[in-house]
Image (cartoon, helix red, strand yellow):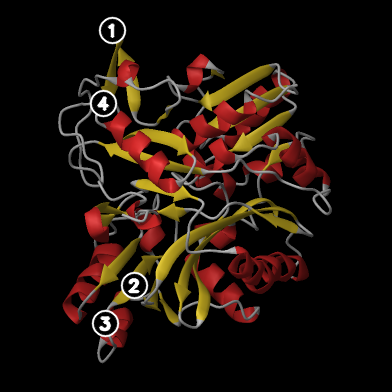
């Protein structure tokens, strides 16, 4: 069968790497893909932000199945368009994906269905928002309502920082139209973790829990990024807690959407805070996480194409998804200046010197004259597997030590909490 991956980052490289191993697949396309994906797929010059062209291509090439990587095409209704044309696609509809592209919608939805989430308030007026901040307890979170590439949440530790965050989002519009409305949310104490699940609209199967590291610096300091690394399985979630998350959060989400006339098919991503009162939802995403995918997918034993077919056909119930023993760790290498302004074109060396069992998932990389150079904020995801988190972590950082480019940034504490050290 012919399969297409929509997107061109590290997450999509990991998905392509797994899909290419399926005995069902004999032709793989990537739109637009990247130079890492080009080794296993034919890259085509169509942007993820152009669902119409993607659908035309899928029809022209008789593509049997499409995977959507990033959130933007989901918010633009790519799934609805493909389904209308009779094309099979893995991902939620535009209405279902509103859980991600509108934080306000997601918070109100959780309120309607008693899904545990921090107390919040929505604002469309910056002056009203700043007035609300008076007398509030800090820290708290100020979030842009719309999509912001994983960077739209600002932790405010004081009244002054909160006011600055409101001004930045709503007045200066640092996230564009995504900041027309904001969510001000109570800050929670606890451990943050990611749980994803496959859903066919009726039932769901949880995926290995993972830990994502958002802030740019060690110790979770500095501004948020798209993700500086991850590991799986997260040690903070055992079987009992996963069952609680499934019964109190995942299943009520799928059921609540169904009751509101929205069938959720695809991957549901839930960002959780594990508090003394139990797990609470910080955010929903409606696709595979990045960089969580780079550690989850390498541990997946079951054919991803087969899982996608179960989801699309509504046949998840009674199915079993199998995982490898052990653990995986991903360390993201980023450009100097990221997540702010950064330069492109820095020469990358050492990638050919890493061990054969290391997975290098390309993100912001280009080929200039036969040489690898940086071409984005997050450049490369270095993933290693091991018998346990400690071994995987050591292998990942050994590989990181072999790679270099001017201004290279990376966190040195990825997965440290998952080891005994």
Measured Cα–Cα span from mark 1 to mark 4 = 19 Å
For mark 3, give the secondary structure.
loop
Q: Which residue is mark 4?
A: 403
Measured Cα–Cα span from mark 2 to mark 1 = 45 Å
Single out the mark in the foreground, 3 or 4: 4
Dots 2 and 1: beta carbons under 8 Å? no
Instruction: Residue 165: name its quadrant.
Output: bottom left
Which is more toward the observer, 364 or 326? Answer: 326
Single out the mark in the foreground, 2 or 4: 4
Relative to 352, is 212 above or below?
below
The residue at 38%/35% (across/down) is 381
Query: Which label number is shown at residue 369?
Result: 1
Q: Give percent across and percent down for residue 47.
A: 49, 30
Which is more toward the observer, 389 or 111? Answer: 389
Structural crowding at the residue carrying mark 1, measured as other residues with C-alpha within 10 Å and reported as few (<14), some (14–19) or many (≥20)? few
Measured Cα–Cα span from mark 3 to mark 4 = 41 Å
Q: Give percent across and percent down for residue 365.
A: 34, 25
Q: Is residue 281 left or right of residue 141?
A: right
Quadrant including the N terminus: top right
Dots 3 and 1: beta carbons under 8 Å? no
The residue at 66%/78% (across/down) is 113
């Amino acid at each position: 069968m012919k399969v297409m991956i929509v997107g061109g980052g590290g997450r999509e490289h990991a998905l392509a790497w797994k899909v290419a191993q399926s005995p069902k697949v004999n032709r793989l396309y990537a739109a637009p893909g990247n130079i890492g994906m080009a080794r296993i797929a034919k890259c085509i010059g169509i942007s993820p932000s152009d669902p119409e062209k993607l659908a035309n291509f899928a029809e022209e090439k008789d593509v049997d199945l499409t995977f959507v990587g990033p959130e933007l095409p989901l918010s633009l209704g790519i799934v609805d368009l493909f389904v209308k044309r009779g094309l099979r696609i893995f991902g939620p509809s535009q209405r279902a994906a509103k859980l991600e592209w509108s934080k306000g919608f997601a918070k109100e939805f959780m309120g309607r269905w008693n899904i545990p989430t921090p107390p919040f308030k929505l604002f469309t007026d910056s002056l009203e928002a700043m007035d609300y901040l008076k007398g509030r307890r800090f820290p708290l979170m100020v979030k842009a309502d719309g999509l912001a590439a994983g960077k739209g949440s600002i932790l405010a530790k004081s009244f002054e920082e909160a006011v600055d965050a409101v001004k930045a989002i709503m007045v200066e519009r640092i996230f564009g139209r995504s900041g027309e409305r904001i969510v001000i949310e109570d800050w929670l104490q606890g451990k943050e973790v990611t749980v994803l699940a496959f859903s066919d609209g009726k039932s769901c199967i949880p995926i290995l829990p993972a830990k994502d590291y958002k802030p740019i610096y060690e110790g979770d300091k500095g501004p948020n990024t798209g993700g500086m690394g991850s590991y799986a399985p997260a040690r903070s979630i055992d079987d009992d807690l996963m069952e609680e998350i499934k019964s109190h959060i995942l299943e009520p989400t799928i059921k609540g959407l169904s009751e509101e006339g929205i069938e959720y098919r695809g991957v549901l991503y839930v960002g959780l805070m594990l508090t003394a009162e139990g797990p609470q939802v910080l955010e929903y995403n409606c696709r595979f996480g990045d960089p969580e995918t780079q550690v989850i997918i390498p541990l997946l034993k079951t054919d991803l194409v087969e899982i996608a077919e179960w989801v699309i056909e509504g046949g998840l119930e009674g199915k079993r998804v199998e995982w490898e023993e052990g653990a995986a760790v991903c360390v993201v290498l980023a450009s100097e200046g990221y997540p702010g302004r950064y330069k492109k074109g820095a020469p990358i060396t050492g990638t050919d010197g890493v061990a054969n069992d290391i997975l290098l998932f390309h993100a912001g990389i280009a080929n200039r004259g036969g040489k690898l150079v940086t071409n984005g904020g997050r450049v490369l995801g270095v993933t290693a597997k091991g018998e346990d988190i400690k071994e995987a972590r050591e292998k990942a950082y050994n590989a990181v030590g072999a790679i270099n480019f001017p201004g290279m940034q990376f966190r040195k504490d990825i997965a440290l909490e998952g080891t005994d050290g």
